[in-house]
Image (tube, rainbow, N blue to C red):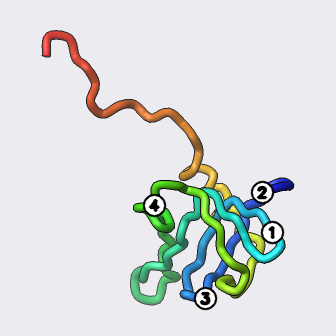
């Protein structure tokens, strides 16, 4: 991987929409921390709700290489999607749920 990464929105041949840090290679795309964008039905007459979930959540790594033939298109993501993506993938330290409490 060389060059600067960008956050892009990709549509895969499977129909999945992925937002990810993205590097463009010669015959491959490299993705880091890909998130699948899922449209969920909203109330009748309202636009759908949008959900985000890790793509391939059971993988040992969060870096993936896709052959370009497996991607239908690559485009700029909506700014609010980029903001949400950065929020989800930030490396903020979260408190440990199994805190050691005195006297326990």
Depth check, mark 3 against mark 2: the one in front is: 2
Of the numbered discs in the image, which one, if any, rests on residue 95? none
First reached walking from the N terminus: tag 3 or tag 1: 3
Tell me how far mark 1 sits from mark 4, CA to CA: 22 Å
Residue plotted at (49% across, 79% down): 39
Observer-nearest of 15 and 81:
15
Label 1: which residue? Answer: 25
How packed mark 4 is, by other alpha carbons closer than 10 Å (few <14, some 14-19, many 20 or more), is few
**Side of 65 relative to 45 (left or right):** right
Name of the residue lying farthest toward the top: 103
Residue 46: x percent and y percent? 48, 83
Kindly check if marks 3 and 1 are in contact, taking CB atoms under 8 A apart as contact: no
What element does badge 2 sit on? Answer: loop
Relative to 58, say whether 102 is above or below. above
How packed mark 1 is, by other alpha carbons closer than 10 Å (few <14, some 14-19, many 20 or more), is some
First reached walking from the N terminus: tag 2 or tag 1: 2
What element does badge 4 sit on? Answer: loop
Label 2: which residue? Answer: 1
How packed mark 2 is, by other alpha carbons closer than 10 Å (few <14, some 14-19, many 20 or more), is few
Label 4: which residue? Answer: 59
First reached walking from the N terminus: tag 3 or tag 2: 2
First reached walking from the N terminus: tag 2 or tag 4: 2
Kindly check if marks 1 and 4 are in contact, taking CB atoms under 8 A apart as contact: no
Depth check, mark 3 against mark 1: the one in front is: 1
Tell me how far mark 2 sits from mark 4, CA to CA: 20 Å
First reached walking from the N terminus: tag 1 or tag 4: 1
What element does badge 3 sit on? Answer: loop
Label 3: which residue? Answer: 13
């Amino acid at each position: 991987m060389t060059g600067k990464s960008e956050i892009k929105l990709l549509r895969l041949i499977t129909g999945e929409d992925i937002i990810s840090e993205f590097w463009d290679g010669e015959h491959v795309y490299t993705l880091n921390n890909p998130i699948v964008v899922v449209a969920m039905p909203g109330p009748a007459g309202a636009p759908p709700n949008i959900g985000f979930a890790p793509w391939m959540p059971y993988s040992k790594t969060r870096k993936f290489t896709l052959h370009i033939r497996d991607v239908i298109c690559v485009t700029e993501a909506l700014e609010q999607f980029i903001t949400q993506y950065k929020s989800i993938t930030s490396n903020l330290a979260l408190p440990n749920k199994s805190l050691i409490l005195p006297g326990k």
